[in-house]
Image (cartoon, helix red, strand yellow):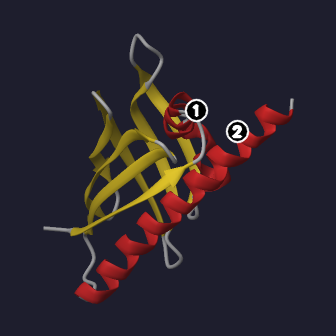
Amino acid sequence: MGERVADSVVVAAPLRLVEDVITDLEQYPLWTNGITAARVIERGDDGRPLLAHFSVNARVLDVDYHLKYDYAGDAITWRLQNGELVSQLEGAYTLRETPEGIRVDYELEVDVNIPLPAFLKARAAKQILESGLEGLKLRCETIHAGRKES
């Protein structure tokens, strides 16, 4: 079993914009630390990604993997289909409208095929989570602010 982490953030942007940023996988290298490339392999009839390839620079080594996406209600979920050195990678963004903005709950469970102490795995999972939430918030709010100025 991998390291499971969860956190949330409130994004001051419309729901549709937050969804669009989350599903625009090719742009992840611009706002997500460590991701060096992202490519959608398969899309659904609605245009949303179903299968994607990611390349990640994990400081010590480069990692490649494929994620399978699913969409149900207010959640965008993903699960590892295959990958180098990654044995488990699944997560979810759950979006809810609040008076302050869109609350994004992010859950992640990750494990690797290399021997690492548990505290290093936990630290890496938490760093992925925090970086993802901070990057998502900044990206959405920056785009939203630019649209309001236009």
Q: Which residue does the numbered mark 2 point to in the structure image?
A: 144
Q: Which residue does the numbered mark 1 point to in the structure image?
A: 17
Q: Which residue lies furthest to the front in this view?
A: 99
Residue in front for this viewpoint, 137 or 47: 137
Q: Is mark 1 on a helix, strand or loop?
A: helix
**What amino acid type should be assigned to the residue bearing mark 1?**
Leu
Q: How crowded is mark 1: few (under 14 residues within 10 Å), some or many (20 or more)?
A: some
* Rendering quarter of residue 138: bottom right
Q: How crowded is mark 2: few (under 14 residues within 10 Å), some or many (20 or more)?
A: some
**What amino acid type should be assigned to the residue bearing mark 2?**
His
Residue at the (48%, 48%) spot, across then down: 54
x then y, percent, for residue 119 = 28, 88
116 w.r.t. 27: above or below = below
Q: What element carries label 2?
A: helix
Q: Residue 39 carries which label?
A: none
Q: Where, quadrant-wise, is the C terminus in this rendering?
A: top right
* Mark closest to the chain's N terminus, 1 or 2: 1
x then y, percent, for residue 5 = 28, 67
Residue in front for this viewpoint, 37 or 126: 126
Q: In this view, does 22 lie to the left or right of 106?
A: right
Q: How many labels does the image show?
A: 2
Q: Residue furthest right?
A: 150
x then y, percent, for residue 93 = 36, 45
Q: Do the residues labelled 1 and 2 touch (CB within 8 Å)?
A: yes
